[in-house]
Amino acid sequence: MTRLIPTEHELHAYVDERLEPARRAEVEAWLAANPQEALRIEAWRVDARRLRAALAGFGERPSDPHLELAPLRRRLRQRRQRRLAAAAVLMLAVGLGGLGGWQAREATLFAGMLPMADAVEAHRLFADAAVLDIQASDPRRLQEWLGRHFNRVGQLPDLSGYGLQPVGARLLSNEAGPAALLVFQDRQGQRVSLFLRSPGEHFDRMPSGQRTDGQLQARYWSHGDYNFALVSAADDARGESLRRALGVSL
């Protein structure tokens, strides 16, 4: 069992794609079972992509140990931690200044938040994962699973008319409590996901809207007791029709 828990060195090797295939599969299974760790490793991936972009064009230069990705990534994390510590001290000082300072802090934090950003990240991390909490090709089984964890959710509509069948679901969590990612797939293997969560502190009732994040399109809304987001490929023409079908039922 201990072997299944990757070391820090193995996690770095996993991000840099230097693990043996068998061990890589074990690490992927461990990450699928540990969503918080998976989010941390995904942040490392983002750091790595930024570093590679910043170092583009250096390939013809002599090897420099100071440009190795792992040490650079550690220095980047340390710098981020110092900035967060400085920001925390500043927030405390502003907060002690009274209610006006606290409201200014809240407004600043809120301005930097994007609606249902957790839905987009959950799709990136888990929509194509081989391991989900439940594998369900039967819509009724997926509905039963959903009802066990979210007892005030509506009836999941049949999406076969849009060429989509359920693949499975994963139970997640965030600052508002439990969340869920439901995954659907068409015959071409293209996947879409439905994310639902309880209303959060800043997005109590989610205004209906949509936004593009890289190659993904997120359509979000509130209905009943939950906030929802449909995440699909940005060029998927079914997106808006799916959102309307789901928005009426759930």
Image (spheres, rainbow, N blue to C red):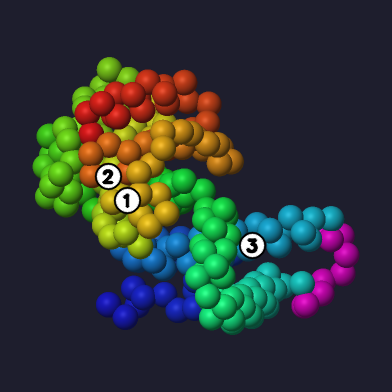
Q: Which residue, given by chain and number where applicable, does mark 1 sit on?
A: 199
Dividing the picture into quarters, in which one does residue 239 lie?
A: top left
**Which one is nearer the viewer's eye here, 168 or 231?**
231
In space, the residues marked 1 and 3 are separated at their CA atoms by 33 Å
Q: Going from the N terminus, do you reach mark 2 or mark 1 first?
A: 1
In space, the residues marked 3 and 2 are separated at their CA atoms by 35 Å
Q: Which residue, given by chain and number where applicable, does mark 3 sit on?
A: 48
Q: Which residue, given by chain and number where applicable, does mark 2 sit on?
A: 226
| Location of residue 77 with respect to 238 vertically, above or below | below
Does the CB distance between marks 2 and 1 fall below 8 Å? yes
The amino acid type, in three-letter code, at marker 3 is Ala
Circle 1 — which element? loop
Residue 17: x percent and y percent? 56, 61
The amino acid type, in three-letter code, at marker 2 is Tyr
Mark nearer the viewer, 1 or 3: 1
Circle 2 — which element? strand
The amino acid type, in three-letter code, at marker 1 is Pro
Q: Main secondary structure of the magenta part?
A: loop
Residue 8, numbered label: none
Dividing the picture into quarters, in which one does residue 57 lie?
A: bottom right
